[in-house]
Amino acid sequence: MVRLVFALMLFFSFAFGVVNINKANSAQLQTINGIGPTKAQEIIKYRKAHGGFKNINELVNVKGIGPKTVAKLKSQVSVR
């Protein structure tokens, strides 16, 4: 049962384009609407400096990303 749940979560993550901001490389981050090369590099820079994101709201701490952008990104990103 656990494997089935995990497989379904994985499927839906890819099917709906959810990107794990703790693991994605620059190219993967750029598939997120509103994230270009500069913001992708800033996300990676922040992630390396702080040991990853604990929650999506931490994106407001990334240079160039504010609360409105985070609200728009919430359906497109995950931290797990």
Image (spheres, rainbow, N blue to C red):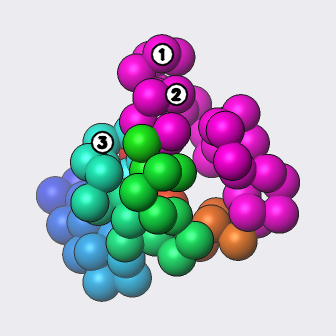
Residue range in magenta is: 42-71
Q: CA distance from mark 2 to mark 1?
A: 5 Å
Q: Are marks 3 and 1 in contact (CB under 8 Å)?
A: no
Q: Do residues under tags 2 and 1 come within 8 Å of each other at their CB atoms?
A: yes
The vertical placement of 42 against 65, above or below, is above
Task: Check residue 69 for magenta coloring.
Answer: yes
Q: Is residue 58 left or right of residue 47?
A: right
Give the label on residue 77, or none.
Answer: none
Does the magenta stretch mainly form a helix, a strand or a loop? Answer: helix
Q: Is residue 68 magenta?
A: yes
**Which label is found at residue 46?**
2
Q: Would you say 23 lies left or right of 59 here?
A: left
Q: Bin the neighbour count of mark 2 within 10 Å (Cα to Cα): few under 14, some 14-19, many 20 and up.
A: some
* Quarter of the image that includes the C terminus: top left
Mark 2: amino acid = Tyr
Per the image, label 1 sits on a secondary structure element best described as helix
Q: Crowding near pointer 1: few (<14 within 10 Å), some, many (20+)?
A: few
Which residue is tagged 3? 23
Report the residue that reaches farthest toward the right: 67
Nearer to me, 30 or 10: 30
Above or below, 31 against 6 in this view is: below
> Which element carries disc 2, helix, strand or loop?
helix
Q: Earlier in the sequence, mark 3 or mark 1?
A: 3
Residue situated furthest front in the rendering: 38
Residue beneath disc 1: 49
What is the quadrant of the N terminus in the image?
Answer: bottom left
> Which amino acid type corresponds to the residue marked 1 in the rendered image?
Ala
